[in-house]
Amino acid sequence: MVVTVQQHIQQQQADITAASGTFSLLLGGITLATKIIEAKIRTAGLSDVLGAFGQTNVQGEAQQKLDVFANNALLHCLGARDMVAALVSEEDEEPVTFDRSPDKGKYIVVFDPLDGSSNIDVNVNVGTIFSILKRQPEGDLQASVLQPGYKQVAAGYVVYGPSTVLVYTTGNGVHSFTLDPTIGAFVLTAEKMQMPKHGPYYSTNEANAEEWPAGYRTYIDTLRSGTAGTYSSRYIGSLVADFHRTLLKGGVFLYPPTKKQPKGKLRLLYEANPLAFIAEQAGGMASNGTGRVLDIQPEAIHQRTPFMIGSEREMTLLAEVLAR
Ligand code: AHG
Ligand code: MN
Ligand code: MN
Ligand code: MN
């Protein structure tokens, strides 16, 4: 008999500190939104969701129509759930807050509604990334939003590819589900996933190599040289898809600092932290080049970070090379 993500999270409930059924209701809001997004993506060419929306977001990016659609789907599905205290999105400058008492509004959901926007119009995998934090009793809501990654209560992503796959963790292993369109449910396909300790792929935008700090060039040259093993280069340009391959096959993904983006391009709260949580739960590692991503104390909701994530062997070698 199939196990859906709702059933699975119920079974996991005991492991989520002081989580009542509200947590599975919260996750239900996320999965509902991703099904709405998935349905729109599958027929993108037939409805008016390709191309630019015509506005620039707080990131300075030209918003795509699907960025806006996906953002609205998540705000709609989650805003209606009374356990949500605040929603933080790549597409919104400020958190969207709800006037709910702290005993009701227990959770903050942080998300990248549509990851890999540059790939939408060319029909290449895109994704949605989410991270769930608990509202802290002390301090204001902003303090609860700016928690370091090790405080996440859950994290996950959906990759919209040949099939639609949801991967999540609540700190008790990494589990994956495939959307079964015949029943409209995410069905369990793998439990307690482990990232291979070594993998044959490195994944980075090599066009930036001349802008990287020298240690990163040395590292990629080492992987290319064959002295550390045989590697292939794979770069999709959608973080979720590049990470999903790394989770399943092993290897390493890197977005180092560049002259244009000296603090890195990827965003800490809704790209690096959720994937770092998943990677570590699966036996992998995630670094900002000098330390563990999950230890970074955020200062701002759209803060960027250099982001390297992958298998133990490739990440250990990276740390050694960067320390030289
Ligand atoms: P988003 O579409 O959510 O803005 O994220 C895009 C990110 C990430 O998906 C990907 O890894 C990276 O941008 C690609 O950047 P480059 O095109 O600079 O390589
Ligand atoms: Mn974007
Ligand atoms: Mn993204
Ligand atoms: Mn995005």
Image (tube, helix red, strand yellow):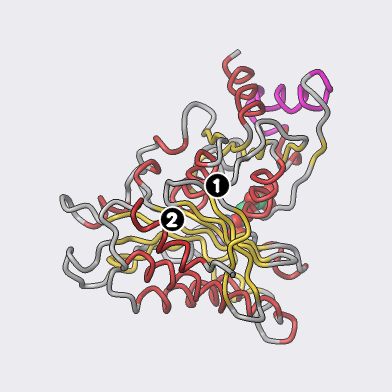
Decide which of 5, 152 is in the foreground and name it.
Answer: 5
- Quadrant for the C terminus, please: top right
Residue visible at 70% across and 77% down in the picture = 42
Relative to residue 231, is residue 322 depicted above or below?
Answer: above
Please tell me how crowded label 1 is: few (under 14), some (14-19), or many (20+) other residues with Cα within 10 Å. Answer: few
Question: What span is in magenta?
Answer: 210-227
Q: Is residue 298 left or right of residue 66?
A: left
Residue visible at 68% across and 75% down in the picture = 51
Relative to residue 58, is residue 255 depicted above or below?
Answer: above
Q: Position of residue 62 (x, y in %)?
A: 59, 66
In the structure shown, which secondary structural element does the residue marked by tag 1 occupy?
loop
In the structure shown, which secondary structural element does the residue marked by tag 2 occupy?
strand
Residue beneath disc 1? 192
Q: Amino acid at mark 1?
A: Lys
Q: Nearer the viewer, mark 2 or mark 1?
A: 1
Q: Position of residue 264 (x, y in %)?
A: 55, 41
Q: Is residue 138 left or right of residue 40?
A: left
Residue beneath disc 2? 131
Residue visible at 48% across and 50% down in the picture = 274
Q: Is residue 156 left or right of residue 180?
A: left
Q: Is residue 263 left or right of residue 120?
A: left
260 magenta-colored: no
Q: Amino acid at mark 2?
A: Ser
The image quadrant of residue 224 is: top right
Relative to residue 279, is residue 217 depicted above or below?
Answer: above
Q: What distance separates the C-alpha of mark 2 from that of mark 1?
A: 19 Å
Relative to residue 191, is residue 227 depicted above or below?
Answer: above
The image quadrant of residue 198 is: top right
